[in-house]
């Protein structure tokens, strides 16, 4: 290793400046960044499935148009993030293969089923709300292409969050059956949303190094607490109960206390044994295989253009 290059890298980080694609970085920084960006990209791509499930059954044209736009945004986020991973030397085809073969993770949250249309609203409110909470600080992440991608992605996530909350407000003004649907969806998604922030700090293998490199700006537990604190008044405004009897304001801490997360469930879902893991990866694999002809045609067209043909 070259002490000059290492010194430059360290001083860029110390001065809170951005690392750019052509800058020298330690091998572990590159590895961590590729891992995190790839997992994030995979999450966006897999994340299209739970909600995509409702596009054909949306209750009105308006809801269908909104949902289509949202799912399309997620595809865009995924592709944008794969491009960011490519600036670090990752190969997009390999990343997709890693996802399909289960060699790389994606967010635990997308392994839960969407049982009713209220789930679409709750995903917007809680899942996208948690994503924003986690991703806004990443706009200041030390890796330039990722940090810049986060700015645009967070703007679109805010729209997603609002559409979900608005959908739920509408349902809560509806029939008792609709209100019940919203409450049940909230009950099912609350705890998995808290798990999105990752393991507790004491068990988080990457947090310390990622904080030192200013890739992460807050720990998993800090962001989880922030999310709990912001969700409580939103639940009250909506008129739903969060399914945690231990949830209460702690004036001394200036935060809400909350119950123990079932980490055994988290571990099971992350290691491939959640309710929908097999279905999600199988669906992605099938879509990838069915898209082979498009990739072949695009490659043939590109080769032809490179060969100088006019048409
Ligand atoms: N689902 C699946 N895997 C997870 C989750 C989760 N909710 N949380 C943590 N993990 C994994 C980590 O990827 C890591 O696995 P690995 O070592 O095999 O790569 C392991 O559990 C240990 O966790 P940490 O040491 O805490 O990992 P890290 O420092 O990377 O923190 C976090 C995890 C908070 C998710 C971080 O990577 C991050 O902020 N990523 C960017 C945001 C993102 O990916 N969001 C995706 C969901 S949001 C959406 O797409 C709408």
Image (cartoon, rainbow, N blue to C red):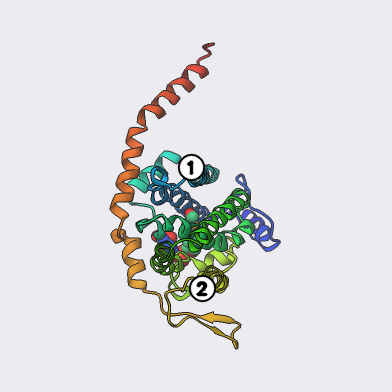
Q: Residues within 10 Å of mark 1 (few under 14, many from 20)?
A: few
| Relative to 158, 34 lies left or right | left
Q: Residues within 10 Å of mark 2 (few under 14, many from 20)?
A: some
Asked which secondary structure carries label 2, the reply is helix
Asked where in the image residue 252 lies, by quadrant, the reply is bottom right
The x and y percentages for residue 122 are: 46, 60
Residue 101 in sight: no
Image quadrant holding the N terminus, namely: bottom right
Ligand 1 within 8 Å of the CB at mark 1: no
**Residue at image location 59% in from the left, 85% down from the top:** 253
| Relative to 102, 310 lies left or right | right
- Farthest right residue? 15
Nearest-to-viewer mark from 2 and 1: 1
Task: State the residue in front, 83 or 294.
Answer: 294
| Relative to 182, 3 lies left or right | right
The x and y percentages for residue 43 are: 44, 52
Looking at the image, tell me whether mark 2 or mark 1 is earlier in sequence order: 1
Establish if 295 lies above or below 264.
above
Kindly identify which numbered label has been placed on residue 61. Answer: 1
The x and y percentages for residue 258 are: 47, 79
Residue 196 in sight: yes
The x and y percentages for residue 175 are: 44, 62
Q: CA distance from mark 2 to mark 1?
A: 40 Å
**Residue at image location 33% in from the left, 72% down from the top:** 264
- Farthest bottom residue? 252
Kindly identify which numbered label has been placed on residue 189. Answer: none
Give the mark count.
Answer: 2
Asked which secondary structure carries label 1, the reply is helix
Residue tagged 2: 221
Task: State the residue in front, 66 or 244.
Answer: 66
Task: State the residue in front, 184 or 18.
Answer: 184
Ligand 1 within 8 Å of the CB at mark 2: no
């Amino acid at each position: 290793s070259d002490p000059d290059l290492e010194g430059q890298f360290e001083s860029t980080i110390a001065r809170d400046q951005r690392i750019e694609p052509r800058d020298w970085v330690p091998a572990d920084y590159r590895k961590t960044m590729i891992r995190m960006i790839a997992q994030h990209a995979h999450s966006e791509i897999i994340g299209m499935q739970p909600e995509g499930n409702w596009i054909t059954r949306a209750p009105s044209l308006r809801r269908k148009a909104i949902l289509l736009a949202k799912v399309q945004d997620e595809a865009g986020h995924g592709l944008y993030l794969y491009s960011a991973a490519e600036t670090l030397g990752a190969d997009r085809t390999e990343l997709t293969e890693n996802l399909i073969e289960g060699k790389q993770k994606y967010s635990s949250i997308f392994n839960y089923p969407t049982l009713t249309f209220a789930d679409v609203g709750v995903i917007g409110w809680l899942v996208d709300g948690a994503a924003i909470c986690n991703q806004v600080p990443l706009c200041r992440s030390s890796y330039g292409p990722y940090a810049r991608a986060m700015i645009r992605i967070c703007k679109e996530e805010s729209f997603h969050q609002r559409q979900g909350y608005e959908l739920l407000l509408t349902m809560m003004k509806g029939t008792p059956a609709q209100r019940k649907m919203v409450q049940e969806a909230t009950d099912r998604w609350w705890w998995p949303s808290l798990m999105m922030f990752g393991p507790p700090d004491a068990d988080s293998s990457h947090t310390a190094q990622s904080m030192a490199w200013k890739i992460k700006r807050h720990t998993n537990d800090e962001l989880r607490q922030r999310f709990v604190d912001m969700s409580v008044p939103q639940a009250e405004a909506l008129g739903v109960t969060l399914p945690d009897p231990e949830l209460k304001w702690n004036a001394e801490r200036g935060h809400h206390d909350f119950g123990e997360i079932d980490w055994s469930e988290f571990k099971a879902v992350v290691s491939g044994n959640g309710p929908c893991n097999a279905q999600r990866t199988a669906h992605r694999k099938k879509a990838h295989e069915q898209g082979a002809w498009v990739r072949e045609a695009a490659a043939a067209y590109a080769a032809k253009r490179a060969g100088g043909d006019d048409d």
